[in-house]
Structures are given as structure tokens and as C-alpha cells.
Amino acid sequence: QIDAMKLFLSLICICCFFSLPAQVIDISQQPQEPFENIKATQVYSDSLATTFIIYIKHEVALHKHEWHTEQVYILEGTATMRLGDTWFDIKANDYIVIPQNTLHAVKVTSSTPLKVMSIQSPYFDGSDRVMITE
């Protein structure tokens, strides 16, 4: 039991020593300049993940990410979303996980833009986005 406690305390110390500083991100801000359809603002990034606040006025065309998992949390608005071959309604407080290589698209149904927090992992630079035409 003492060895297990030493291991636990050692792990705590290592995690505290190597942890990144915490960051608070204000997600209440609105875009300052006009945009046509999509406005994506990167709010955080490291080697493990990249976080965006994205505003969508009309739609996100069908696409996939070859090596990224995307997690989307709906902050405002409503839409229909395609995930694989299935369409479903999404709204504020919905959380969607999009595994790598999964087709997805969005069509906004609200009168205001859809606002989402998108977390891509690992680090995302857009190079694995593959647009799909059907």
C-alpha cells in the first residue's frame, strides 16, 4: 500500500510540474466584421488539439477529416447535421463527436448564425480536410 501511495504522489507531482498553464477563453464575443457564410476564429492550440469558435450563416459543405477527430458543442442556433449517412436536428447544448474519416455537413435552420465550439485533435491546420461532391 505504501508503494502504491508513493506512485500516486509521484504521478501527481509529475502532472503538476509538466502541466500547461490554464487558459480562460471568452466564448461570448461575436464576430467584429461581416462575413459571407462561415467565420472561424482559433481560440486555442497546442500539439494535441486546436479549438475554434465557428459561426455559420447558411451551411458547411459535405467533407471529412482524414486524421482528426472533431468534437462540436452547439452554443447558439439550430441546424440539421449530416453525420455519415444520417441527418438529424441540432440545437444549443448539443454535443457531437465526429470520428476521423466521417462525412459531415451542416445546414442552418435558425434565423441567426449557428455558433459552435469545435475542438479538433490532434493539432489542426486544415490540411486533412477533404471536400466531398455527391
Image (cartoon, rainbow, N blue to C red):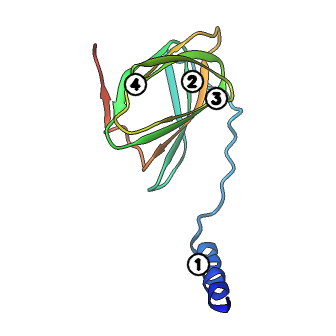
* Residue designated by label 3: 94
Q: How many marks?
A: 4
Q: Secondary structure at mark 3?
A: loop
* Residue designated by label 4: 84
Q: Disc 2 and disc 4: Cα gap in Å?
A: 22 Å
* Residue designated by label 1: 14
- In terms of sequence position, does the residue under pointer 2 or pointer 4 come before the other? 2
- In terms of sequence position, does the residue under pointer 1 or pointer 4 come before the other? 1
Q: Is residue 60 above or below residue 68?
A: above
Q: Is residue 133 above or below residue 19?
A: above
Residue furthest to the front:
1
Residue 41: x and y, percent?
54, 34
Q: Are marks 2 and 4 in contact (CB under 8 Å)?
A: no
x 39%, y 20%: residue: 85
> Which mark lies nearer to you, 4 or 3?
4
Residue 112: x and y, percent?
65, 13
Q: Is disc 4 surrounded by few (<14), some (14 to 19) or many (20+) residues within 10 Å?
A: some
Quarter occupied by the N terminus: bottom right
x 34%, y 43%: residue: 67
- In terms of sequence position, does the residue under pointer 1 or pointer 3 come before the other? 1
